[in-house]
Amino acid sequence: MPVLPELIRVAAGVLRARLAAARRARDAGYTTETVVVTALLVALAIAAIAIIVAKVLDKANSLDLG
């Protein structure tokens, strides 16, 4: 599953960029927390989708059609 590490790396990069942007802003109280939580949820959702797709594809490929 080489897709999952790449997705996690991309999600981590997005999270780092958003955190850096939030640190630069002076009035980033509640918004920073919202951005961090949203980015984490997106990363978890992408990882979950990648795992589900991999399992479905493995199951589909293991079916004997002959």
Image (cartoon, grey):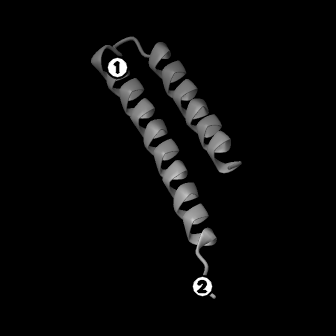
| Mark 1 vs mark 2, CA separation in Å | 50 Å
Numbered mark located on residue 3 in the image: none
Which corner quadrant of the image does residue 58 belong to? bottom right
Q: Secondary structure at mark 1?
A: helix
Query: Label 1: how many residues lie within 10 Å, few (<14), some (14-19) or many (20+)?
Result: few
Taking depth in this image into account, of 35 and 5 the one nearest to the observer is 5
Residue 37, position as x, y percentages in the image = 37, 27
In the image, residue 42 above or below residue 61: above
Q: Amino acid at mark 1?
A: Glu
- Amino acid type, callout 2: Leu
Which circle's residue, 1 or 2, is located before the other in the chain?
A: 1
Q: Position of residue 60 (x, y in %)?
A: 56, 70
Residue 55 vertical position relative to residue 26 in the rendered view, above or below: below
The residue that appears at 44% across and 30% down in the rendered structure is 40
Residue highlighted by disc 2 = 65
Q: Which residue is labeled 1 in the image?
A: 33
Q: Nearer the viewer, residue 19 or 65?
A: 65
Please state the horizontal and vertical placement of residue 16, each as a whole percent of the image: 57, 25
Q: Nearer the viewer, residue 57 or 33?
A: 57
Instruction: Check the image and report above or below for 48 versus 28.
Output: below
Q: Quadrant of the C terminus?
A: bottom right
For the point 34% across and 14% down, the residue is 27
Q: How many numbered marks have been drawn onto this rendered protein structure? A: 2
